[in-house]
């Protein structure tokens, strides 16, 4: 499993980055586009993990567990 983070770069682009990676997997003009791509990558077979989305202030504004096989998942109060 590979967790991912969506955040805004200093050049104004939104990055979809695998946690621990040196470079972004993809760059986007909008936060929504970066988030959709991160979710698509986490939904691939054998993937899954946590998606963290940061706002323009670089603070985490949402977290979501995607495609993770957990027999007792926590109750998601956000969605």
Image (cartoon, rainbow, N blue to C red):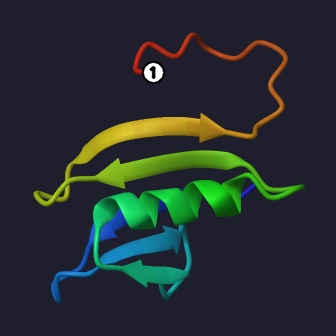
Task: Mark yes or no: residue 74 visible.
Answer: yes
Give above or below for 33 relative to 73. Answer: below
Q: Quadrant of the N terminus?
A: bottom right
Q: Is residue 23 left or right of residue 12?
A: right
Q: Which residue matches tag 1?
A: 79
The relative height of residue 30 versus residue 2 in the rendered view (above or below) is below
Q: Is residue 62 above or below residue 33?
A: above
Hey, which residue is sitting farthest right in the picture? 46
Please state, as top left, top right, bottom left or bottom right, where the C terminus lies in the image.
Answer: top left
Q: Please tell me which residue is depicted at 35% across the width and 38% down the height of the picture.
A: 62
Badge 1 density bin: few <14, some 14–19, many ≥20, Cα 10 Å: few
Q: Quadrant of residue 5?
A: bottom left
- Asked if residue 6 lies left or right of residue 4, the reply is left
Q: Quadrant of residue 20?
A: bottom right
**Residue at horizontal 41 percent and vertical 83 percent from the top:** 27
The image shows residue 68 at horizontal and vertical percentages of 76, 37
Left or right: 36, with 67 as reference point:
left
Please report the residue visible at 58 percent of the width from the left and 45 percent of the height from the top: 50
Q: Which residue is depicted at the point 40% across and 20% down?
A: 78
Residue 15's place in the image compared with 4, above or below, is: below
Is residue 3 in view?
Answer: no
61 and 37: which is toward the camera:
37
């Amino acid at each position: 499993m590979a967790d991912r983070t969506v955040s805004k770069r200093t050049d104004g682009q939104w990055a979809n980055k695998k946690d621990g990676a040196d470079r972004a997997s993809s760059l986007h003009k909008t936060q929504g586009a970066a988030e959709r791509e991160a979710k698509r990558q986490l939904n691939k077979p054998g993937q899954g993990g946590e998606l963290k989305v940061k706002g323009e202030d670089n603070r985490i504004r949402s977290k979501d567990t995607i495609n993770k096989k957990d027999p007792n998942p926590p109750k998601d109060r956000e969605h």
